[in-house]
Structures are given as structure tokens and as C-alpha cells.
Amino acid sequence: MAAFLPFELITEILTKLPVKSLHRFKCVSKSWNSIITSSKFIKQHLHQTLISNTNTNTHIIISTNSIVSSAISTVKFRFHIVNHPLDHLPNRSPGNITGSVHGVFLLVDSSTKTLCLFNPSNKTQRLVPHSPSRKPASPSPKLAFVFKLVEVFGFGYDDNTDDYKVVRLAQWELFGYFDREASVYSMRNDSWESVNDETVSYTLQETSAIAVDSTLWFVMISNNSDSVLKCFDLRTNTFWLVDFPELDRDSGKNIFMTLRSLRDCVCLLVSYRNKNRVFLHADVWEMNESKWVKLFKIRKNEIRERCMFLRLVTYSKDMKSVLIEVDCDWHGWYDLVTKKFRRVSVQGLEAVDAPYVAYPYVETLVSVENNKVVSKMEGTWPKKTIKKNDFLSSGFKLKL
């Protein structure tokens, strides 16, 4: 057996290892640490991770008063507490997760108006500066009833510039005066810029945007209660509108819609409820080649428990089941073949208060620290430099 493996082979092996193992292996030697922390390796490891988890995710995260995470299992979720990056803020509200890309989350604290990018896999974080705004000054308490501000954030990845971006959409109304604005934060430039929005005016729905293929999708509502999707291309900074599929608008039914990104596609789950908001059934749609395609229907008798609405989370590894969140309170696997629903056992959710929303993700090395913006794939490998005082390189043997 050769005394040393070729440098390129070591690197190839490392790209296939999970994040937790790579964090440990940084201590093997300075050369290994240089490889694992290099921009090129981080990009290659991300690419390998996304390929091996093409249709599904491996973890879910929940954020309310605390942040907890669990590996996805078909039987039981075992959640563990993740250090909250905004714990140092006084009087902070429960942090809401607004979007996830490549294992990085955008946390929004409504009380302090703080935005934070956070990767729970490597514990890196970045506070996003406040967006400059031209909205009118906050009215006095006596005028609060005539002032309405809606603010929605989205988080996505621009594959043209290899940049992670935050988009802020805001609308306000005061004494009949109505206006709106849009701005984009670039992590690479660490700055905001205003963008034009020439689409027809609709009211923002205060829900998180989803990101699919460098495009953010926002839910909008018109004056006659019809809904549309407002899309924003992170590559060109342009907006356009997309209609929802043909829905059952029976006057006796109440509709609750949620968006998710599954299989790199926009997926819509429409929960139909009676006048008392008790769940009747749900339709799941997917945007395929600019057209809505109905994937499947979930019926009330298949859930077997009284509820109000459902939310998609992710697919199972074999694509035969889908993880469903029920009333932002519990989860179950819906078998697409047998049409049966099985509730998932959980452990470690004591620190989290319902209602909550679970977000799926894959563990990555992507860093969001100010001096750690991941660069493009172009470049050279770090030179293999082993000094005499690198005792780990010369005196430590790793058993795999």
C-alpha cells in the first residue's frame, strides 16, 4: 500500500463526506484544513451534496422562540437545539425563517427589524444591514388605524453572479395614499439597491417567498380577492406575474394556499375548508414548463384527524411519500401509492412553541461570514504546504 494517497484523490473523497465529518477532519493537518476551507472545495462539496440529494432534503429546521433541527426520518424525528444567532438581541421576537438556499436561512426579527443570514451546519452568520426606505414616518398612535405597512422578504441565489441575495418588498397606505418599493441586498457587495416594479398593483400576502432557479415567488392578492404570484428574477432584477391554477371557488369553501420548492419546482398546496375552516381536502399542483400540473389530492378521510390546513415539507428519498405539516403543529408521511397517512413521532420539541413552520434543508459548508463569501469555481487549488511544526501532519494517523 502506498504511504500517501494522491492529493487529488483525497480531495475527491472529502467532497463526498458529510459536513460534520469535514469539520472534524480539518484538524487532521494544515493541508486538509486548507482544502476543506477553500472556496473551490466548498463549491464542489455543495455541488456533490445537491446531486446526491436531487429530489429531497436530509434535515428540517424549526424557528420560533428557539431553533431546533432534526435529520429527516420515516419513523421518528429527534430534534436538537441550535444556538440562535439573534439571542443577543434584547426584546427580540420569535425569529421567523424566510427562505432557505443551499443550507443557508434568512431569519427576520419583526420586533427589532433585524435580518440575519445563518447556516446552522457550520454556525456562520451575517447581520444584514437595514434597507434604506422612502416610506413615510410612522404615524402617531392616534393615526395608527389609518396606517398600514406590509413588508415581505425573500432569499435566493443568483447563479449568474454566484451571489446570495435578499429581496424586500414593502407596501404602505396612509390617508388613502398608497405606494410600494422593492430593494435587493447583495451578500457579495454587502449593500442594498432599489429596483423598479412595473407590474400591476396587488396587495402583498404576509407569507415567505420561495426560491426556485434564481427566481423568487411572492403571493399577491387583488382587490377582488383573486390571487396571483409575483416573480422576481435575481439575475435581471425584473418582475412579472403568474396566475394560479384553476381552483374550486365554491362559495361554501374557504381556501388556504401555501407555496414550497420541491424537486426544484414551484409546488402549491391548496387546502379547501368549510365555513368553520375545518379541512375538507387538498390539491397539490406543480409548475412544469410554465404550466400548472395537478400532482395528487389528499382527502379528509386519509388524514383521519381533525385539522384546518396542510403544508408541504419535502419528499422521501424514494419519492414514494411526501412529508406533510398539519396546522403548523405536527407532521406525517403521506404515501402517494397507498394513499395512507402516518403520523411521525417526535422527540425534543419541548423548546418550541406551536404554531411553527418546518423548513427542509441539506447540510452544506457555505459560509455567510463577511470575509467568507464563496467565490466562483474558477481558481486554483490551495498549495499543499506542510511545515515542520505541523505535528498533526507528521505524527497523527487517521483511521477511516
Image: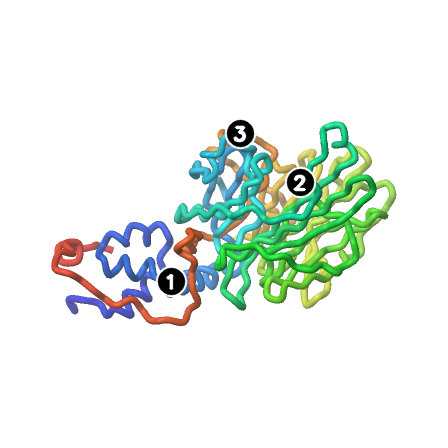
Select label 2 or label 1 by which is in front.
1
Q: Residue at x 70, y 66 (%)?
A: 290
Select label 1 or label 3 by which is in front.
3
Q: Earlier in the sequence, mark 2 or mark 1?
A: 1
Specify the label residue 39 is tagged with: 1
Do the numbered discs 2 and 1 sit on residues whose CB atoms are within 8 Å?
no
Q: Secondary structure at mark 3?
A: loop
Specify the label residue 91 is tagged with: 3
Specify the label residue 303 is tagged with: 2
Q: Residue at x 56, y 36 (%)?
A: 112
Name the one closer to the observer, 6 or 386: 386
Q: Earlier in the sequence, mark 3 or mark 2?
A: 3
- What distance separates the C-alpha of mark 2 from that of mark 1? 46 Å
- Whether residue 210 is situated above or below residue 138 in the rendered picture: below
Q: Locate residue 373 relative to residue 107 in the image: left or right.
A: left
- Whether residue 261 is situated above or below residue 377 in the rendered picture: above
Amino acid found under the numbered disc labelled 2: Ile
Residue 243 x/y as whole percent: 77, 58
Q: Locate residue 56 relative to residue 339 in the image: left or right.
A: left
Q: Quadrant of residue 18?
A: bottom left
Amino acid found under the numbered disc labelled 3: Asn
- Whether residue 35 is situated above or below residue 274 in the rendered picture: below
- What distance separates the C-alpha of mark 1 from that of mark 3? 37 Å
Amino acid found under the numbered disc labelled 1: Ser
